[in-house]
Image (spheres, helix red, strand yellow):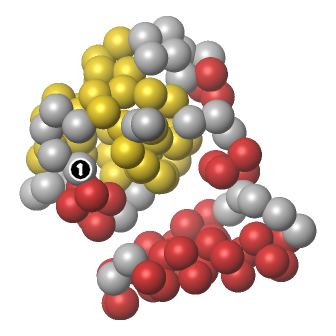
Amino acid sequence: MKRTLVTTALLAVLGGGAPLALAQTEHDAHHGGASAAAEAPLAEGTVKKIDKSAGKLTIAHGPLESLNMPPMTMVFRAVEPGLLDQVKVGDKIRFAVERAGGALTVTAIEPAR
């Protein structure tokens, strides 16, 4: 998993968002399906603050089932800076989060439906 995140982050930095999707697709093809982050249920939330210089965002979220956490507002790291460009304050989102190096890290974001 760490190798995939490092590879994906490196690809994203070198070539933008398209390599991120390609890296995930290649990972899925080699491992017979979706990654663990994609398998985990996405949490719902509202973006409250974005700090691009620190690579963090504040989200008021519902339960984080994968981490057994109740609803609250908290700060998360972004797995890569490009994720922060996908949202603005006030956006309703669905997101994946995991513990990475002791920090809660957002690994994927999509608009809420």
Q: Amino acid at mark 1?
A: Val
Compared with 1, 108 (above or below) is above
Compared with 4, 103 (above or below) is above
Report the quarter where the C terminus lies: top left
| Of the pair 58 and 101, the residue shown nearer to us | 58
| Of the pair 18 and 1, the residue shown nearer to us | 18
Q: How many marks?
A: 1
Q: Does residue 101 appear anywhere in the picture?
A: no
Question: Horizontal placement of 95 versus 30: left or right?
Answer: left
Q: Residue furthest right?
A: 32
* Residue occupying image coordinates x 23% and y 50%: 87
Residue 15 occupies quadrant:
bottom left
Residue 27 occupies quadrant:
bottom right
Residue 102 position in % (x across, y down): 48, 39
Q: Secondary structure at mark 1?
A: loop
Residue 81 position in % (x across, y down): 27, 64
Compared with 33, 40 (above or below) is above
Mark 1 Cα-neighbour bin, 10 Å: few <14, some 14–19, many ≥20: some
Q: Does residue 97 appear anywhere in the picture?
A: yes
Question: Horizontal placement of 46 versus 64: left or right?
Answer: left
Mark 1 lies on residue: 87
* Residue occupying image coordinates x 33% and y 82%: 16
Residue 42 position in % (x across, y down): 56, 36
Compared with 35, 61 (above or below) is above
Q: Residue furthest bottom?
A: 14
* Residue occupying image coordinates x 48% and y 84%: 19
Report the quarter where the N terminus lies: bottom right
Q: Residue furthest front?
A: 113
